[in-house]
């Protein structure tokens, strides 16, 4: 079958599918980026899962501008119920790769989040919540994304903007997490050996007065630096594999540290992702979570879950 026929067939299927009629996905991306075949099972298994979330809004680059802490937000995920009510567009199901998403699922806010200002404790407006999972086929990790329509909160130069706000948490299976941790440990071992070798060669290069020896040690130091690059250490160091992992239903593990972000709308369509802060999450039974405090780690780093931006 010709490629043009395949693309036309894919386009027809996408346009005829009631769940994808608004996605306008690129048929070529649909052919290249295939979904994890277990994603619907993963999402459905989260029925009635509870997440206790704390948000830390602010930038570490401007510590004097203040921060906004939102605590006590308790969500119940509905894994079998589609979010068939108005909700913010989700980056997966409403993005360029809708085939990678579980689809928008509904959620219930069991306890609203609160923040404290000069006037006391105030409820934070987070409306029309929905969530999804994104997971590409053969990718070691996926992501759980929650979206809200938020009310504006300001404190000094820090603000939670009115409009769409998203929380993203990396997600692994037990097998993929174990495999990645083993590969990361091996990469770290190779990287440490390469760094030690590089330091030793630089030391020898600086100490010798022989020009030929200097050149040899310089070459060896460059080779050690190349080995460091090829060890994979830098790639694995960007993954939050050493953070606390929260067990979820379906043999899944959720990273306890995620990001809070929004997306700026521009005149010609969607704009850039804007990082607002971090989110920390705990899971468990409702009576356990009622009095449980969640502490937020102030690390404003983007979370990469499989190298593919939704």
Image (spheres, rainbow, N blue to C red):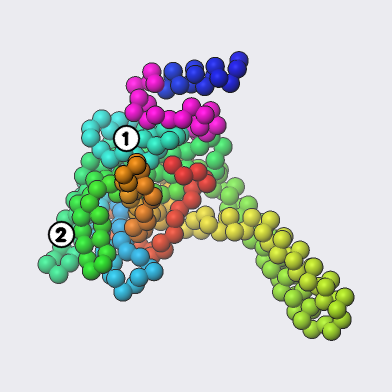
Q: Specify the segment rendered in magenta.
A: 15-37
Which residue is labeled 2 in the image? 122
Label 2 and label 1: CA atoms lie apart by 28 Å
Q: Is residue 215 left or right of residue 129?
A: right
Picture quadrant of residue 193: bottom right
Which residue is labeled 1 in the image? 105
Picture quadrant of residue 45: top left
Of the pair 241 and 8, the residue shown nearer to us: 8
- How far across and how far down the image is residue 73, in percent? 25, 52
- How far across and how far down the image is residue 172, in percent? 49, 45
- How far across and how far down the image is residue 166, in percent? 33, 48
Residue 79: which numbered mark, if any?
none
Q: Is residue 157 left or right of residue 119?
A: right
Exactly how many numbered labels are in the figure?
A: 2
Q: Is residue 55 above or below residue 206?
A: above
- Can see residue 25? yes
> What residue lies at 34% left-to-right and 48% top-to-bottom?
263
Picture quadrant of residue 115: bottom left
Residue 17 in the magenta stretch? The answer is yes
Residue 222 in the magenta stretch? The answer is no
Q: Secondary structure at mark 1?
A: strand
Q: Main secondary structure of the magenta part?
A: loop
């Amino acid at each position: 079958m010709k490629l043009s026929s395949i693309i036309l067939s894919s386009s027809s299927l996408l346009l005829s599918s009631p769940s994808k009629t608004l996605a306008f996905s690129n048929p070529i991306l649909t052919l290249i980026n295939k979904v994890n075949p277990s994603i619907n099972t993963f999402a459905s298994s989260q029925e009635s899962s509870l997440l206790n979330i704390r948000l830390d809004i602010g930038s570490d680059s401007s510590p004097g501008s203040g921060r906004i802490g939102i605590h006590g937000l308790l969500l119940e995920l509905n894994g079998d119920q589609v979010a068939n009510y108005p909700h913010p567009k989700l980056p997966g199901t409403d993005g360029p790769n809708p085939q990678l998403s579980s689809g928008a699922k509904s959620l219930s806010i069991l306890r609203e989040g609160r923040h404290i200002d000069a006037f006391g404790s105030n409820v934070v407006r987070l409306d029309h919540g929905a969530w999804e999972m994104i997971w590409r086929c053969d990718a070691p990790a996926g992501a759980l994304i929650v979206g809200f329509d938020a009310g504006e909160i300001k404190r000094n130069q820090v603000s939670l903007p009115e409009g769409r706000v998203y929380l993203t948490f990396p997600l692994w299976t037990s097998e993929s997490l174990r495999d990645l941790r083993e590969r990361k440990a091996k990469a770290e071992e190779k990287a440490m050996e390469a760094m030690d070798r590089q330091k030793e060669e630089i030391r020898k290069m600086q100490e010798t007065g022989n020009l030929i020896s200097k050149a040899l040690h310089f070459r060896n130091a460059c080779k050690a630096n190349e080995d460091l690059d090829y060890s994979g250490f830098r790639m694995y160091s960007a993954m939050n594999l050493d953070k606390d992992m929260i067990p979820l239903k379906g043999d899944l593990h959720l990273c306890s540290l995620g990001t809070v972000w929004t997306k700026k709308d521009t005149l010609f369509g969607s704009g850039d992702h804007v990082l607002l802060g971090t989110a920390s999450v705990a899971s468990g039974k409702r009576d356990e979570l009622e009095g449980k405090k969640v502490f937020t780690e102030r690390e404003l780093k983007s979370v990469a879950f499989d190298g593919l931006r939704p």
